[in-house]
Amino acid sequence: MKKENRLVYFVSESTAITASSLGTSLLSQFPDIEFIHHRKPFINTMKKAAAFADELLAETLKSGIKPLVFATMTDKEINTLLAASSCHYYELFSRYIHEIGNDLGIKPTSISGASHGLISPSSYDKRMESINYALLHDDAMSMKNINKADVILLGVSRSGKTPTCLYLALQFGLRAANYPLTEDDFLKDDIPDVLKENRDKLIGLTIHPKRLAEIREKRRAGSKYASLANCRIEINHALEFFNRYGLHVFDTSSSSIEELSTLIIQAMR
Amino acid sequence: MKKENRLVYFVSESTAITASSLGTSLLSQFPDIEFIHHRKPFINTMKKAAAFADELLAETLKSGIKPLVFATMTDKEINTLLAASSCHYYELFSRYIHEIGNDLGIKPTSISGASHGLISPSSYDKRMESINYALLHDDAMSMKNINKADVILLGVSRSGKTPTCLYLALQFGLRAANYPLTEDDFLKDDIPDVLKENRDKLIGLTIHPKRLAEIREKRRAGSKYASLANCRIEINHALEFFNRYGLHVFDTSSSSIEELSTLIIQAMR
């Protein structure tokens, strides 16, 4: 049976990333419908809002079904216009802002204050520095300054270290390094001394052998590197190291990058 | 005058990234208060919820002020427990879920469906591939496969190309390459042919000379590279290129990475 389609728009005066994030989360509760997502950022003038309202009307006339609109909107005039337009309108901001104001006993400012729009040079610098750090310390490219890491991820090749490090840097401003466990380490049956000295920062990443073989197969088809047998051996040896040094271990095959990063931050405390 | 402090918690059964994102955005409307943020992910059992409720009570007794709690929570039992605990409770999910269900004419599932928890191997692969692409094509390290890019960012050294590329890859699964404009290009007074062949994918990044000098100064203090005069010359020459080839240009000194990425995606359409 073909799923029913519904148009969905995520709207805000800024990036609409927050509206998109909460809206997507809400819509995941309705798995029987296929939602077609559109992000509409920077709807920050009445003119842009009116053009968007026209688009909503045109879509409704075309399909006979009103689109859904999720918005985080601080401008009252734009809000009123969109709420009256041809859509199911869910505004995720104003309902709460007055409640919070009442609870705090102060009035909210009326400036659009989407969090993604606020940049302070100091937090930008920290983020940049963390990204540079992650890039320099990716895949053990440089072990220099490894002592300055907030966290060091250990795992076999293609176990998900790099994207997780980059996410930790970009989203949380953490200095995340990673070290790939390779045949050298397995032959020595130990990890480098510099890692042992930073044992409290080490986190182990593991992955299902079948999933790893799949990922590696795309990289080097038919290689020993990608074979299921070799993937099994490497992962088992890595798990042995993690166990020996008492590391927190997370499985990247069953978690998103966001979940992994959150689990890692929890483990770091 | 010292700002008033308030404790804030962001809570969910999954990563609490969505709750944190919307909550932070809402709180930015109250700039006179300093909010101390805590993320509480994976509150997915009554036991964890009860322990968290105890923590809220202890904090209230200590300071005499109730913390704020922003939650995206699908579990009704946990919701009821937290709503009755010692805090101002803002639940960002259930209010909407019934409204959406009514509008769609179907019931929501009761499974926790935070968007960050859902991973499909295909979208994971796309994300990984995009990240690898961004890393390989960072700073013109490889011009191979540059034709496969979705977007190519141009700008002088330290103008914000790398973090923006990584964000585009991580958050939107786009193949983002970047090319640093250097003295070579300025002496030739032109950009490489391979870029001209991909003119429709080019986006120019610029930055205020003072901000650039500041950033470069941290890298190589006292160098010609970091001097304000040199930064001015490089930026002017880069802007001349952008103008010559009719590129969209965005200023990284006044926008966050999220805003820049959103602007770039809009310009790509």
Image (cartoon, coloured by chain):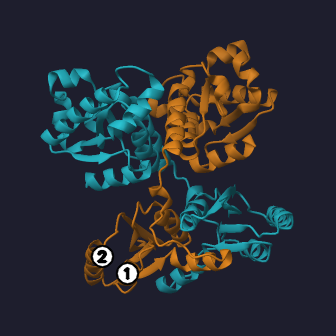
Chain colours: A orange, B cyan
Residue B196 found in image quarter: top left
Callout 2–callout 1 Cβ contact below 8 Å: yes
Vertical position of residue B108 compared to residue A158: above or below? below
- Relative side of B20 to B212, left or right: right
> Callout 2: few (<14), some (14-19), or many (20+) C-alpha neighbours within 10 Å?
some
Closer to the camera, B171 or B144? B171
Vertical position of residue A179 compared to residue A69: above or below? above
Indicate the secondary structure of the residue bearing disc 1: helix
- The residue lying at 25 percent from left, 22 percent from top is B183
Coordinates of residue A228 in the picture (x, y in percent) = 59, 31
Q: CA–CA distance between discs 2 and 1?
A: 8 Å
Residue sticking out furthest to the front: B1
- Relative side of B147 to A39, left or right: left
- The residue lying at 45 percent from left, 22 percent from top is B221
- Relative side of A44 to B54, left or right: left
- The residue lying at 73 percent from left, 40 percent from top is A268
Coordinates of residue A183 in the picture (x, y in percent) = 62, 17
> Callout 1: few (<14), some (14-19), or many (20+) C-alpha neighbours within 10 Å?
few
Residue bearing mark 2: A46
Q: Which mark is residue A77?
A: 1
Assign the C terminus of chain B to one quadrant of the image. bottom left
Q: Chain of mark 1?
A: A
Q: Chain of mark 2?
A: A
Assign the N terminus of chain B to one quadrant of the image. bottom right
**Type of the residue with mark 1:** Glu
